Image: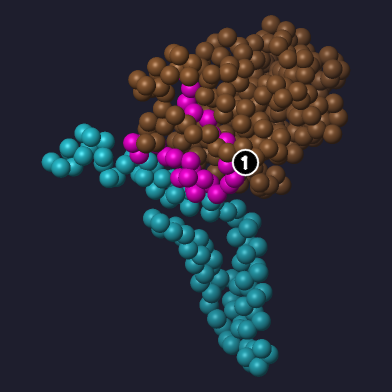
Chain colours: A cyan, B brown
Amino acid sequence: MLELIQKLFGKDSNSSKDIAKERLRLVLVHDRVNVSPQLMETLKDDMFKAISNYMDINEKCMEVNLTHTESSVTLVANIPVTSMKRGAMSKR
Amino acid sequence: MGEVIVITSGKGGVGKTTTSANLGTGFALQGKKVVLVDADIGLRNLDVVMGLENRIVYDLVDVTDGNCRLKQALIRDKRYESLYLLPAAQTRDKNAVTPEQMKQLCDELKQDFDFVIIDCPAGIEQGFKNAIAGADRAIIVTTPEVSAVRDADRIIGLLESEGKHNPKLIVNRIRPRMVKKGDMMNIDDIIEILAIDLLGIIPEDDYIVVSTNRGEPAVVNPISQASTAYKNIVRRLMGENIPLMVIEDNTSFFNKLKKIFNL
């Protein structure tokens, strides 16, 4: 009832511009991560090179993906390690 | 050497052509030599907004195809001597011109004019790529609506990938009464979302419809709010530091009264 009165007097706490802003924020998170497959391949290559300095990994089984949830975007990488590189730790 | 400014938006109907016409005329009012280039090939409109539709002999594609010299295609404005229009072709499509040709055209116009203003077509395809090819800087027009702001964000990304950095934003058609009620996004909301610099704000103004009907840009009218807003933007583009205008709700009784007595 109170809500209805508030709405009548235009004092709705959940004003439509806030709804607009929140919807925009979410839709842009998704729009902005529309990265090309090429870029993902390059990223995968770079990650492979970097990680290979420390451990042996299986490039063929390596998976790198962007996952979208309601409010965020996460880079998820699944990289099977074959073996640790001897001496990798002492290099640093 | 002049400067090439492209007016773009992504979404159609947000006021690119109106903005182009008013900024161009505004520069002419400041004594600058300006040319307006209608890059919307196949859907030309800048000519009618400027009231120059009856004077077209040659168009942009005639120039790039070599059917005429650039000077022959330029139409001088009926009110201001230093204002010119290069109309778009109406019977061709966007693929009639290449980005390289547009760049060459802009470079040539820059030699003769202080400002070259390009009215970009809606969309992100060939027409957009042509329009931005020769631009030194970009102005993005948006309205306080979800769809227009989303498209503006996409355009910012595309401009960036084409090497056009730091575009400036114009927020058009603001309705102060709705903003006050919380039913329209305000300037801060939009700037926060798009994260680019604000160049100016234009209130929703009935006079824009009247001026388009007549074919004379609103900026000429001394009492229209939109006119003041456009004049401010012109001066900012010329390097002056002008504060943002306070948009008044002129639908209230008091403001209507003020307008009648021209206070």
Residue B37, given in percent of the width and then of the height, sits at 72, 24
The residue pinned by badge 1 equals: B168
Residue A85 can be seen, yes or no: yes
Q: Is residue B248 left or right of residue B153?
A: left
Q: Is residue A71 above or below residue A62?
A: above
Residue B10, given in percent of the width and then of the height, sits at 57, 35
Q: Is residue B192 left or right of residue B162?
A: left
Residue A82 is covered by the magenta coloring: no
Residue range (magenta): B181-206
Q: Nearer the viewer, residue B200 or A60?
A: B200
Q: Is residue B251 above or below residue A78?
A: above
Which residue is at a point 37% across and 41% down the rendered structure image? A17
Residue B81, given in percent of the width and then of the height, sits at 77, 15
Circle 1 residues within 10 Å: few <14, some 14–19, many ≥20: some
Residue B9, given in percent of the width and then of the height, sits at 58, 34
Q: Nearer the viewer, residue B190 or B29?
A: B29
Q: Is residue B70 left or right of residue A65?
A: right
Which residue is at a point 65% across and 68% down the rendered structure image? A45
Residue B101 can be seen, yes or no: no
